[in-house]
């Protein structure tokens, strides 16, 4: 049995979710977790820049 998988980036996955009108509960949870991850990543980047500026 052969499984064909396709690689996709997180950004492409989130963008593809924007095009879908109806999502299952599981897909909504995945979307929320991805958005939470991206927000935390951006926040960490901002915090690192603040710390860097304070130390400089």
Image (tube, grey):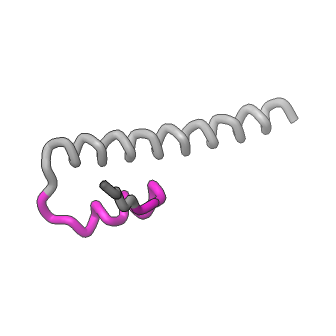
Q: Quadrant of residue 5?
A: bottom left
Q: Residue at 28% x, 60% y: name it.
A: 17
Q: Is residue 13 left or right of residue 17?
A: right
Residue 12 location, x and y as percent? Answer: 42, 63
In the rendered image of this protein, does residue 55 appear above or below residue 27? above
Q: Quadrant of the C terminus?
A: top right
Tell me where residue 7 sits by quadrant: bottom left
**Residue situated furthest right in the rendering:** 56
Residue 8 occupies quadrant: bottom left
Magenta range: 6-22
Q: Residue furthest bottom?
A: 19
Q: Nearer the viewer, residue 54 or 32?
A: 32
- Residue 42: say if magenta: no
Residue at coordinates 63% horizontally, 42% vertically from top-left?
Answer: 45
Q: Residue sitting at 19 percent across and 42 percent down?
A: 26
Q: Residue 33: where, in percent of width, then height?
A: 35, 39
Q: Position of residue 16 (x, y in %)?
A: 32, 65
Q: Is residue 45 left or right of residue 29?
A: right
Q: Residue at x 73, y 32 (%)?
A: 51
Q: Is residue 49 left or right of residue 18?
A: right
**Quadrant the N terminus occupies:** bottom left
Q: Considering depth in this image, is 21 or 45 the residue closer to the camera?
A: 21
């Amino acid at each position: 049995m052969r499984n064909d998988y396709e690689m996709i980036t997180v950004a492409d996955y989130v963008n593809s979710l924007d095009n879908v009108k109806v999502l299952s509960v599981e897909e909504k949870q995945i979307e929320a977790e991805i958005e939470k991850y991206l927000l935390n990543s951006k926040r960490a980047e901002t915090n690192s820049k603040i710390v860097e500026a304070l130390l400089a």
